[in-house]
Amino acid sequence: MLAACSSGPLYGPTSIPPGSPVVSSTANWPDDTAALPAPLLQARSRWTAVRWAELPGLRDDPLHEAWNAWLKSCERPGPVFAALCSEVRRLSIGGVDEQRAWLMARLQPYRVESLSGGAEGLLTGYFEPVLDGARVPSAEFRVPLYQPPLGLAQRKPWYTRQEIDTLASAQAALKGREIAYLADPIDALVLQIQGSGRVRITQPDGTQRLVRLAYAGSNEQPYKSVGRWLIDQGALRDASWPAIKGWIAQNPGRVNELLWSNPRTVFFREEPLSELDATSGPKGAQGVALTPGRSIAVDPGSIPYGTPVWLASAGPAVNLQRLVLAQDTGSAIVGAVRADYFAGWGGPAGELAGRLKQPLRLWVLWPK
C-alpha cells in the first residue's frame, strides 16, 4: 500500500465496539502533573492532551525497536520533529529507561479522536509479498506487471482493470512496458494492493535475480475490495486470501469477473535489492524505508508523516501496545483513528496482515 497505493482490508467498513481503557502505573515516573495543553485540531481529527498514564503498556515496550524506525524518519523529518533528531540519534544507544524518560520530558501525548469525539477506530495490516516471476512470458508465467504507461498523466482516470485487459488502445499503451510476469493473477492483485513486493525473476538465460517492485503510480480508479465483492455475492463468509484462492479453484471461469470487480490497478518500477536493502521494507509515503512492526500507514489529514504514535489494539490476530511511526498512507486508510500496520515481508507477515482487522486507539506524541 505504499505511497498512496490502494491498500487496506479485504472487507468493507465495519463498526468497532468501544474498548475499555488500560491505565499504566505511574510509580517512580517523572512528574506528570502540569496543566494539560488545549486540544489541537487537524483536518480530519482532534487531538486531546492526556497524561502519560493513559498510554497502555508504556512500561513494557522495548523502545529500541521503535527507535530504529524513528532514525529512518529522521532521514526525511518534517519541520516539527527535525529539531529533535539529534537527540533521537544520541538516544539510539541509550537504554529503554532513558528513552522513555526522554519521551516523557520532551513530548506530550494527545489522544487521537474523530472530529465528533470518537476515540475508537480500525487497525488492519499490510505486508510485502515475496513472489516468483519471469522476465519473458510462458505457459506458466503469463500475468504481466507493468511500468507506468507513457502519457499516464494525460488521461485521468486511466483505463479500468477490465479495459486494460480488453481494449486494444489500452494494451497498445502498455506494449513494451512489461517488467515481469507472474503465474497467478491473484498474486498480481495482492502485489498491487500491497503496493510493493519482492520478486525472484528468472532471466531469459535461466539465472535468477531478486528485485523489489515499488509503487510507481496507478490508474487512479477507485479501489474496490474483491473480498467484499465475494461476500456481497454470497460466495464467501471469510474473505481471506486463502479463501479467495479456494473460491477461484472452484470457479475458474469467474476469475476475470472477480478481478474486474476492482477497477484499480497499480504500476511499478524495478529497484535492485541489495543485502542492506533486504533488511528493511520498501519506502513509504514519507520517503523512508518501513520497519516491520514499527511503521504504520495513516491518513495524513489526521496524523502527519514522521509523527511518533502510541498504538493500542487487542483482538484475535495480535495484541499490540507499542510505539510506532507514521510513515505511510494508502487510499483505503481514511479517517482519524485508522491505521495499517506494516507486518514485514513473506509468508508469516502475509498471514498476519490478512487476519488483522480489529479495534484501535492512537495517541500522537507531539513536542511540548
Image (cartoon, rainbow, N blue to C red):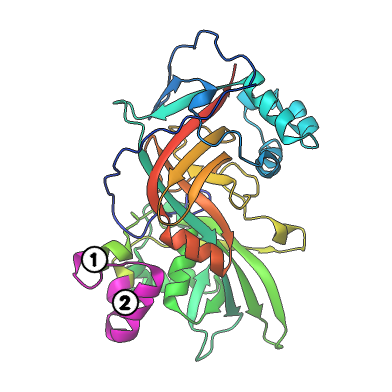
**What is the span of residues highlighted in magenta in the rendered image?**
231-258
Q: What element carries label 2?
A: helix
Identity, as a three-letter code, of the amino acid under mark 2: Asn
**Which residue carries the number 1 mark?**
231
Residue at image x 77%, y 36%? 92
- Can residue 129 be seen here? no
Question: Which is more toward the observer, 360 or 332?
Answer: 360
**Which residue carries the number 2 mark?**
256
Question: Which is more toward the observer, 272 or 294?
Answer: 294
Question: Which is more toward the observer, 281 or 137?
Answer: 281
In-image side of 152 versus 215 (left or right): left
* Residue 43: % across, % down: 40, 27
Q: Quadrant of residue 65?
A: top right
In-image side of 315 versus 61 (left or right): left
Density class for disc 1 (Cα within 10 Å; few <14, some 14-19, many ≥20) is some
Mostly what secondary structure, the magenta segment?
A: helix
Q: Residue furthest top?
A: 35
* Residue 110: % across, % down: 48, 24
* Residue 184: % across, % down: 46, 79
Q: What element carries label 1?
A: helix
Residue at image x 41%, y 58%? 219
Does the magenta run of residues contain 244? Answer: yes
**Can you tell which of label 2 and label 1 is closer to the viewer?**
1
Question: Which is more toward the observer, 13 or 56?
Answer: 56
Q: Residue furthest bottom?
A: 139
